[in-house]
Each structure stands twice: as C-alpha cells, then as structure tokens.
Image (cartoon, grey):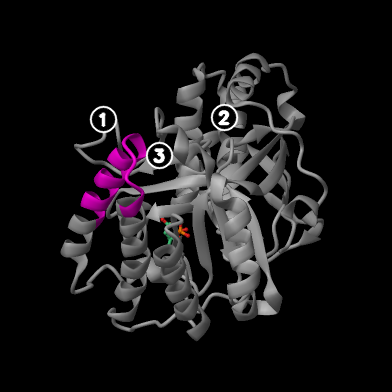
Amino acid sequence: MINIDNYKTKLTSLLSFRMLFEKNRSSVSMNIDNLKVSWECPSNIALVKYWGKKEEQLPLNPSLSFSLKKAHTRTTVTIKPREMKRLNFRFEGEESSFAHRVDQYLDKLSIDLSWINDYSFYFESENTFPHSAGIASSASAFGSFGLCMADINHKITGKKADNEQFLHEASRLARLGSGSACRSVYPGFAWWGKSSAYKGSTDCFALHVNKIHDIYSDMCDAVLIISSDRKKISSSAGHALMNDHLYREIRIRQANSNAIELYQLLKAPDHQRFFEIIENEALTLHALMMSSMPSFILLKEESLKIMDKIRMYREDTGIQIGFTMDAGPNIHLLYFREDQRKVHQFIESELKDLLEEGKWLDDRIGEGPVRLI
Ligand code: DP6
C-alpha cells in the first residue's frame, strides 16, 4: 500500500467544515495589487457518472460523488497588476504543460469576471497523491482553482456571500475548468445536475448532500492501481463520444434513475442495492465507451479479474464491498470502515499480485476543502 499521508509533506491539519466557513467570512483585508490566496481541495470519486456534456461544460445527466480524504491539490494564487505575461504556472515547483489548460481556463472565466484581464496570475500547485494513479487530478486541481478564484473575486469585487453561496460560486468556477471538479468543493457527498427529484439542483454547480445516514460517512476507498500509463483518451474526447451515441437517451434516463435511487439509499441504506447501482454505473461507463464510434477499451485483463474477485468475496463472506471505476483501468474498491481490517487483508492476499508493482492507495471519504491562507 502506498501511504498517501507520507507521499508529500504531511497534510495540513484539516479544519472543520464550519471553521472553514467562519474563516472565509472574516478574512477580507488585503492589498489588491499583490493579493495571495491558497486552498487545498480534494479529488472525488463519482458513484453515478457524469458522462457527456452540452453547451458550456454542462452535464447531460446528474452525477453523485464523494470527496476523498487524502488525495488533494493545494494551490496558491498570487495576483499582481497586469504584466506582459498573464499566467505563470508551476506544478510541484516546475514549469508544466498544464499551464496551457489553465490559461484557457482564465480566458473562460474572464467572460464573466472581467477584472481577470487587469491582472497577472502566479499559480503554484501540488498534489498529495501520485500522478496517473486512478485518482482524478483535474477534479482536485480545478476544485482548488475554483476556490481560489471565487475567493479573489469576492475580495476584488467586495461581493458579500454567505458560506453556502461562496461554495456554490467556487463550484461553478471549478466546473468551467473540469466538470467533475465542481463536486470537489464539498465535504462528503455532492450532487451535480438538474433533476426535479433534487430540490435546488442545477447544471451550473454542485450541491452538498446533507443528512445522509451515518454509515455512509465512513465509506472507504482503496484505489487499486492496475496501470499508471497515460490515459488513452482525454475526458473531453470521452464526453464527446456521447454526442451521437446510439444509447444517449437511454443513458440519460438510466443515470437520472440511478442518481435518484442512490440519493434515497444514502438516507435509508440498503447495501446490496447500493453496490448494485454503483457497479452498474461503472460498467455502463465502460460499456458506453466500448459501444461508441470510435470505440475504446480501457479495461485491462486485471481489471476484469479484480471485479470478479470482489464479487466473489462479497458473495462468500457477506462483507459489503463493491467497485467503481473512472475512464481508465484502475479500480476503486469501496467498503465500510468497520470491515477495514478484513478488506485490507483481502487486498493484500488476493488482489495485490494483479496490481502494478502491488500498488494501491488507502483513502476514504473526506472533510472537503481547506483554506490555507
Ligand atoms: C468518468 O470532469 O474529467 O470521471 O469536464 O472534460 O474535465 P471534463 O471531464 P471530467 O470527467 C469525469 C468523468 C468521469 C465521471 C465523473 O467523474 O463523474
């Protein structure tokens, strides 16, 4: 197991959700000409998948996810009066090709936040988890950028917002960089996408799912690394496969019904049904990629073997575990904290040989973002 706690410098101790908000409300003194903000934002794993978009980064269907506890991006943004170069982006202390995407992101934001054109931006970003390990780094990265930019926006414009409004705004700004990032700005579970079954829901930003059953606040996620090779297809190209997909309308119906049912299960648990839906979502995502034109096979032999073993273990032991996946071969093994010891044993004895260099990450549901400065 890779210990993410030690992968980078130790995580800054997490403030509670409430403290984060209180602090957010009070800190307004700054020098606009040299303003610095800093946020840490988790990645998230979707249980109901966002797959396919319309218009400006809006989802075809609602999605539901939870934020991770250990896999974070920390970003510091300093703004100065506009110089020749608008963006200076460093990732883990080095120049990075990701700068191009961040520059495009600033372009997008500037349509709405016109002050962006008056400043130069210094972004310094780092992750607490290894690259290409089956954890969505664009979700935590753009989550942290959205929080930083919402924070700067409030300071520059003097706009007043309560904590909930601030996070909605951060979520909306994060979405413009990467859709799944809009769900990362909350602790625990988040819902993104308009649905008549979810009050107040919108395609523009995600909402924090509250009042869930206690058992789900202890959800664990073992990220099993089957391959850390670069993605075969980018997320944007993947979403575009849904534009004229033969199963597009059916998928939209299925995702809506899965999202609503899963949301209800978070309040009134039925573990068997919970894992049925989650696995159905993961397998559907891959089935959609396999049945698109052009088609993509992202699963590896080991992915299939592991899914099979997880199901067999569940059947044999009655222990409630299940799997989900993103658009890649790696598997997120989900289980409950009370079974941690047994599940870790299962991974070490039954699954480890199928993993790339035996690697897996031990993560679980987290407390959401933290303001660092
Ligand atoms: C399969 O959010 O990475 O992980 O909006 O183009 O940045 P962009 O896509 P992205 O897509 C994530 C797709 C997914 C499912 C999910 O996280 O809901």
Above or below 190: residue 222: below
| Residue 227 picture quarter | bottom right
Mark 1–mark 3 Cα distance, whole angstroms, equals: 12 Å
- Residue 182 at x, y percent in the picture: 46, 44
Residue that label 2 marks: 153
Secondary structure mostly taken by the magenta-highlighted segment of the chain: helix
- Front-most of residues 123 and 182: 182
Q: Residue at x 62, y 42 (%)?
A: 41
Above or below 246: residue 100: above
Task: Name the element at disc 3.
Answer: strand
Residue that label 1 marks: 199
**From where the camera sits, is residue 299 visible?**
no
- Which quarter shows the C terminus? top right
Above or below 87: residue 328: below
- N-terminal of the two: label 1 or label 3? 1
Which of the two discs, 2 and 1, sits closer to the camera? 1
